[in-house]
Amino acid sequence: MRTGLTRSFHVVIVAMALLSVCCLTALGAQAQGQQRDGLEVLCRQLGLRDAATVPHGVEPLVVDTQDLLREVVTGTRAILGRMPATVSTTSAGDPMHRSLGLVETYLSFHYSMKVNPILGTRFNLWADVWVAGSGSFWEITDAYEWVGLTGISYCHDLSSEWHYHRIASDRRSIMVAGGAILDTYLLVKGVLKIYSEPVAISFTYRL
């Protein structure tokens, strides 16, 4: 009789253990589902879009929490919403002698701004500004400019790139500008997303 009671007790214990495991599994699945649903809602609120593929050489940033997603998106927006701290470097090219005693050379400019608060990615505008003259007379003759990313940029890509320059009528100053759409590729709970923001830099150089 006692053996039967013992067996019954063991059966009850095993059943309760199995029930506990099932409940914990169900609660875990429910929590994961709620987290996934919360991330999807946040993606819509932050303006993320579904992406079918990623460009060659781009590796999406894995995001599995709402806090990290907010940090990536709102941090980038906060940086781009302020006047960016620009770093510029200028170097002179080798002078090239031309006829009539005129000399032509160029100045290289580099301006950059941080666009990712976590990775330190930077958007850059480079320009070579050509000047010609002799003595005290110099004028700006042409310019060539381009844009690109530097730093850790594996999850970023640029699209709709643009750049131009405008030389003043007296050829004593030039305005150079460049920009693009900064696309950030994210893997949110196994779903590929893309977050896009415009970026731009401009500067003016005067002789």
Image (cartoon, rainbow, N blue to C red):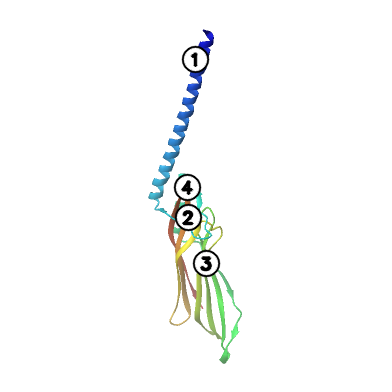
Query: Residue type at mark 2?
Result: Tyr
Badge 3 marks a residue whose secondary structure is strand
The reply to whether the C-beta atoms of the residues labelled 2 and 1 are less than 8 Å apart is no
* Mark 1 or 3, nearer chain start: 1
For disc 4, the marked residue is 190
Label 2 vs label 1: CA separation? 57 Å
As rendered, which of 1 and 52 lies closer to the eye? 1
> Which residue corresponds to mark 3?
111
Tell us which disc is closer to us: 2 or 4.
4
Q: CA distance from mark 4 to mark 1?
A: 46 Å
Residue receiving disc 2: 185
Q: Is residue 37 above or below residue 22?
A: below
Q: Which mark is residue 8?
A: 1
Q: Name the amino acid, label 1.
A: Ser
Q: Nearer the viewer, mark 3 or mark 2?
A: 2
Query: Mark 2 or 1 closer to N-term?
Result: 1
- Where residue 192 appears, x then y in whole percent? 45, 52
* Sooner in the amino-acid sequence: mark 2 or mark 4: 2
Q: Residues within 10 Å of mark 3 (few under 14, many from 20)?
A: many
Instruction: First in sequence, mark 4 or 1: give its number.
Output: 1
- Closer to the camera: disc 2 or disc 1? 1
